[in-house]
Image (cartoon, rainbow, N blue to C red):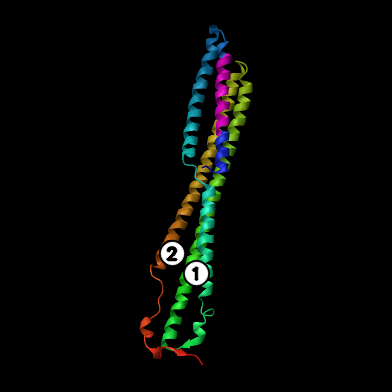
């Protein structure tokens, strides 16, 4: 299911498609009333319409490709929140409970066994805090990506609106044969402006995704650096009764 902003862009795209078709229909209706002996006047208009059709095709080829893979800012924000709520916060709570200052065993026991046990705790706390930090970094990265996708589709809507406004004005101008060349020029200009806005938006989101990719690679390396084993105490120092003494 597409995000609301993508759906809004889709609705605006359909509106534009209707406006463009209305313009072509309007021009055809006007030209149908022109006598054949005005062919010298009609031919330039037909050439202009052919150029417009090509420009419109270029526009839709670019736009439809974007709608095929719209992305989901809502999903990015949802997953970002889940990383913090289901991983970062829970790990942070666990880390807070196993610190040396929180564990009664460190107050009740002493000896080689107690020291070996205590030596493992800081590494365990550090590992947990690293996981929490990674969860927060993932949240930030995913939120940035979601915001970037939203900004892209906001720019897309602006580009589509610009084209709709240009097409609406061109329809009015195309009411007469004399006005059709002006209308063609107006709608070609609107198409050019819209394509330029879309191109800028694409370049912007590409720059963002490159940044996000770098962030994700850094996070992946940090995950690798965490290792695959939980920090364990030196059990060899805990096997004898003499290794443990009740603190007095």
User: At which x and y percent is residue 62?
Assistant: 48, 35
User: At which x and y percent is residue 111?
Assistant: 44, 89
Q: Nearer the viewer, residue 134 or 154?
A: 134
**What crowding class fits label 1: few (fewer than 14 Cα within 10 Å), some (14-19), or many (20 or more)?**
some
Q: Is residue 228 above or below residue 173?
A: below
Q: Is residue 78 above or below residue 28?
A: below
Residue under pointer 1: 129
**Residue found at the very far bottom of the displayed protein:** 248
* Residue 36 visible to an observer of this rendering: yes
Q: Are marks 1 and 2 in contact (CB under 8 Å)?
A: no
Residue 19: image quadrant is top right
* Residue 193 visible to an observer of this rendering: no
Left or right: 12, with 127 as reference point: right
Q: Is residue 235 above or below residue 150?
A: below
Q: Residue at horizontal 45%, vertical 74%?
A: 124
Q: Secondary structure at mark 2?
A: helix
Q: Residue at horizontal 61%, vertical 20%?
A: 174
Magenta part mainly helix, strand or loop? helix
Q: Residue at horizontal 52%, vertical 85%?
A: 107
Q: Residue at horizontal 55%, vertical 31%?
A: 14
User: At which x and y percent is residue 27?
Assistant: 57, 18
Residue under pointer 2: 222
**What crowding class fits label 2: few (fewer than 14 Cα within 10 Å), some (14-19), or many (20 or more)?**
some
Q: Nearer the viewer, residue 188 or 216?
A: 216
Give the number of callouts.
Answer: 2
Distance from the alpha carbon under mark 1 to that under mark 2: 12 Å
Q: Is residue 217 magenta?
A: no
Of label 1 and label 2, which has the lower sequence position?
Answer: 1
**Residue found at the very far left of the displayed protein:** 236
Q: Which residues are magenta?
A: 13-30
């Amino acid at each position: 299911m597409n995000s609301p902003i993508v759906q809004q862009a889709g609705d605006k795209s359909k509106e534009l498609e209707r406006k463009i078709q209305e313009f072509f229909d309007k021009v055809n209706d006007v030209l149908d009333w022109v006598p054949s002996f005005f062919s010298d006047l009609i031919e330039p208009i037909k050439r202009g319409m052919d150029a417009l059709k090509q420009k419109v095709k270029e526009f839709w080829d670019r736009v439809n490709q974007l709608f095929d893979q719209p992305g989901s800012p809502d999903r990015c924000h949802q997953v970002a929140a889940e990383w913090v709520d289901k991983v970062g916060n829970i790990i942070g709570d666990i880390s807070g409970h196993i610190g040396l200052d929180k564990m009664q065993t460190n107050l009740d026991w002493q000896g080689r066994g107690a020291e070996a046990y205590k030596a493992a705790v800081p590494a365990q706390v550090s590992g947990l805090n690293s996981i929490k930090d990674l969860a927060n970094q993932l949240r930030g990265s995913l939120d940035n990506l979601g915001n970037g996708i939203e900004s892209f589709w906001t720019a897309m809507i602006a580009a589509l609106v610009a084209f709709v406004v240009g097409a609406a004005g061109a329809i009015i101008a195309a009411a007469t044969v004399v006005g059709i060349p002006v209308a063609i020029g107006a709608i070609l200009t609107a198409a050019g402006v819209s394509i330029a806005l879309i191109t800028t938006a694409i370049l912007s989101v590409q720059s963002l995704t490159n940044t996000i990719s770098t962030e994700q690679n850094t996070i992946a390396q940090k995950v690798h650096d965490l290792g695959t084993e939980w920090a364990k105490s030196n059990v060899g120092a805990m096997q004898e009764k003499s290794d443990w003494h009740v603190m007095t």
